[in-house]
Amino acid sequence: MTTALRLLAALAAGLTFGLGLSLSGMLDPARVQGFLDVTGAFDGRQAWDPTLAFVLGGAVSVAGLGYVLARRLPRPAFAPAFELPTNRRIDRPLIGGAALFGIGWGLSGLCPGPAVAALSTGALPVAVFVAAMLVGMMAHHRFAARA
Amino acid sequence: MNTYASGFAGGALIGLSVALLMLLNGRIAGISGLVAGLGRDRGLRRWVDTAFVAGLIAGPAVFALITGAWPTMRFVAGLPILVVAGLLVGFGTRLGSGCTSGHGVAGLARLSPRSLAAVLTFLGSGMLTVALLRALV
């Protein structure tokens, strides 16, 4: 019973995430890149697009409320325990990985959530991006196994 | 609804999803980690994460059913650049343990200094990349 509820909860959360992304405008690579384009406003090429900041603000506020609530509960509703990251170090893999991710994000206007969600649109560029992303993830898996 | 309002409302839905996944299943909603986990995890965990990703992919289609229009997508790069970008995003998010959702939404909501460092780094490198792109191309 709990297993079925856990599957249903994951499906509902995923659907809510995908609907939120769709409503937010963050599936649109031009809009995301417009946020990252901070120099565009100076030479009058293109006005800066602050939408992403509103999306992040809305998301962090609601998620924050949920996390505050979670802290007061002994365990999640359908699972034995809360799984929280234990690594607290700000180290080179964290910063290097985030820097590489940012380059790819800036070049394409795509990050994992919107790209995976947008697979349902059937757009070829999305499929190509996601395929390359999976290859990049597998490459890291090999690299991490060797290191 | 104007762009900023729908951005905030959409963001709130994303936050609701992140909150639900923690309150109900005890998990961080980080998309890069969940997607990478599909290839590694076994048993129930794999099914649960598959259910989340299936829901995520269904999202835009359900949005189209409700509103009568698919979300706007204007691509800014050709296929060769998208391949390079995809490789960087895939490798970088695993090396850095997260992306815009795991570090950006969930991490900031937990007030994690590690996630804040990651967010500032990928925002900085993303902005620098677009600035260089605009200056050179």
Image: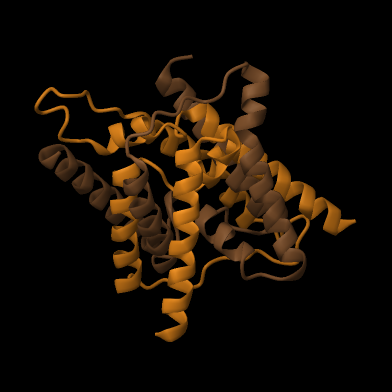
- Image coordinates of residue B16 in percent, x first then y, are 60, 40
Say which quarter of the image contains residue A45.
Answer: top left
The answer to whether residue B63 of the structure is visible from this angle is yes
Residue A80, above or below A64 = below
Residue B93, above or below A42 = below
- State which chain is coloured brown: B
| Total residue callouts | 0
Which part of the image, by quadrant, shows the C terminus of chain A?
bottom left
Q: How is the rendered protein coloured?
A: by chain
The answer to whether A102 appears left or right of B101 in the picture is left
- Image coordinates of residue B114 in percent, x first then y, are 38, 63
Residue closest to the eye, A75 or A49: A49
- Image coordinates of residue A76 in percent, x first then y, are 72, 58
Please give the name of the residue rendered at 36% of the width and 35% of the height, measured from the top-left corner: A32
The answer to whether B136 appears left or right of A124 in the picture is left
The answer to whether residue A87 of the structure is visible from this angle is no
Say which quarter of the image contains residue A6.
Answer: bottom right
Residue closest to the eye, A107 or A95: A107
The answer to whether A85 appears left or right of B111 in the picture is right
The residue furthest bottom is A146
Please give the name of the residue rendered at 57% of the width and 65% of the height, measured from the top-left corner: A84
Chain A, chosen colour in render: orange
Please give the name of the residue rendered at 60% of the width and 32% of the height, measured from the top-left corner: B60
- Image coordinates of residue A31 in percent, x first then y, are 36, 30
Which part of the image, by quadrant, shows the N terminus of chain A?
bottom right
Please give the name of the residue rendered at 38% of the width and 35% of the height, measured from the top-left corner: A29
